[in-house]
Image (cartoon, helix red, strand yellow):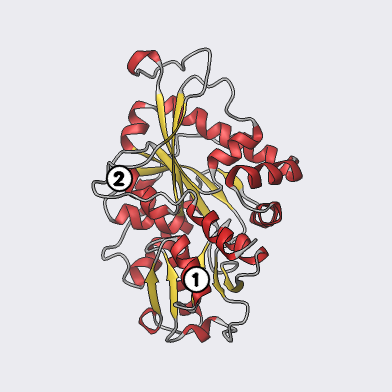
């Protein structure tokens, strides 16, 4: 892939919120179905689920697995380049739900966003990583002292940067973190205006297979590998049956994907516009599994919140127990 094509693939779906938090771009999908779900009242007889997503996320998974058939509601999709603008949309109730990592969820909740995690998954954190150019002299996290690292503020990339440098004995202020969206951060790295880029899948795999970057520090051993399906309080109150159905479809689609690795990887590559090699790499090493929201999940999330408080990214202590709704199930 050429440098230009690689950059354009990052920009293709790079939607951001401008002006009011309620102004956003929507990729609509009216999906046919026969019967509306009971217990959900909506205009003209059919409920509408406003689903936020990130690149290579839930929509790609559901479409590849054929998991959108027979819906009793319409889905209105909005794609965001990172968790921060997705959290903004959740806060503005421009979307009802969306996938978000453990660190961005802490950041959003500390800012007062009225959401709860309704589903949790664990994955291998290798692809959440600090990347450098292939010819970079940097070898370890300690080498980031005084260097410029690009990432999204409050993102899982921000989190892995802070975990990596503190584990290496550095203080957060000893690294120059520059907050950029993924497309801009990737370009800044390749052009040399930053020394490193902290990001996540599929951006990590895409950068690796295109030989634009290598992993300096991975999140393996640093992060609990948690991410969530988060929904607004208002959606939980008014669309609970729809949310449960959507979550269950995602869980089933995930199980299908691991039974059909080649087919899913090819479909994912086609849907999100990345090379098949990158799609398969990020999928196979992520090993994502949906799990029950149990005491371990809550304890790990509390650890993330406590770390953010320790490094000064949130100003107040946050008790995460109230940010989960354990009334949703994830049976396979």
Q: Is residue 205 visible?
A: yes
Res 294 label: none
Left or right relative to 13: residue 44: left
- The image quadrant where one finds the N terminus is bottom right
Q: Is residue 201 visible?
A: no
Mark toward the viewer: 2 or 1: 1
Residue 208: give x, y in percent of width and height.
64, 66
Q: Nearer the viewer, residue 84 or 17?
A: 17
Residue 242: give x, y in percent of width and height.
45, 26
Mark 2 residue element: helix
The answer to which quarter of the image holds residue 158 is bottom left
The answer to which quarter of the image holds residue 135 is bottom right
- The image quadrant where one finds the C terminus is top right
Name the residue: 35% across, 81% down. 173
Q: Nearer the viewer, residue 205 or 123?
A: 205
Residue 27: give x, y in percent of width and height.
44, 36
Res 197 label: 1
- Mark 1 closeness class: few <14, some 14–19, many ≥20 residues within 10 Å: many
Count of numbered labels shown in the rendering: 2
Name the residue: 42% across, 86% down. 146
Can you identify the residue that label 2 sits on? Answer: 91
Vertical position of residue 43 compared to residue 180: above or below: above
Hey, which residue is sitting farthest left in the picture? Answer: 20
Left or right relative to 117: residue 292: right
Mark 1 residue element: strand
Q: Nearer the viewer, residue 66 or 285?
A: 66
Vertical position of residue 231 compared to residue 49: above or below: below
């Amino acid at each position: 892939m050429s440098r230009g094509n690689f950059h354009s693939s990052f920009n293709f779906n790079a939607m951001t919120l401008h002006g009011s938090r309620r102004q956003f771009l929507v990729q609509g999908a009216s999906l046919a179905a026969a019967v509306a779900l009971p217990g959900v009242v909506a205009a003209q007889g059919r409920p509408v689920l406003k689903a936020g997503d990130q690149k290579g996320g839930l929509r790609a998974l559901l479409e590849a697995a054929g998991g959108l058939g027979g819906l009793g509601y319409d889905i209105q999709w909005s794609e965001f380049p990172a968790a921060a603008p997705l959290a903004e949309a959740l806060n503005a109730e421009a979307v009802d739900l969306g996938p978000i990592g453990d660190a961005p969820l802490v950041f959003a909740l500390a800012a007062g966003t009225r959401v709860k995690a309704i589903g949790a998954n664990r994955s291998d954190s290798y692809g959440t990583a600090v990347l450098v150019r292939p010819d970079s002299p940097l070898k370890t996290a300690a080498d980031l002292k005084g260097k410029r690292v690009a990432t999204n503020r409050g993102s899982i990339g921000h989190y892995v940067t802070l975990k990596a440098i503190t584990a290496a004995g550095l203080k957060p202020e000893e690294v120059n973190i520059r907050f950029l969206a993924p497309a801009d951060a990737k370009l800044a790295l390749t052009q040399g205006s930053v020394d490193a880029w902290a990001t996540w899948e599929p951006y990590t795999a895409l950068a690796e297979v295109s030989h634009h970057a290598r992993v300096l520090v991975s999140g393996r051993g640093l992060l609990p590998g948690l991410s969530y399906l988060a929904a607004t309080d208002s959606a939980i109150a008014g669309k609970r049956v729809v949310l449960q159905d959507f979550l269950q479809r995602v869980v089933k689609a995930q199980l299908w994907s691991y039974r059909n690795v080649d087919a899913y990887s090819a479909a994912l590559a086609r849907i999100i516009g990345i090379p098949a090699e990158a799609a398969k790499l990020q999928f196979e090493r992520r090993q994502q599994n949906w799990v029950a929201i149990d005491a371990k999940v809550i304890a790990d999330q509390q650890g993330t919140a406590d770390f953010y408080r320790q490094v000064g990214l949130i100003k107040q202590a946050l008790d995460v127990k109230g940010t989960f709704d354990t009334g949703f199930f994830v049976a396979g």
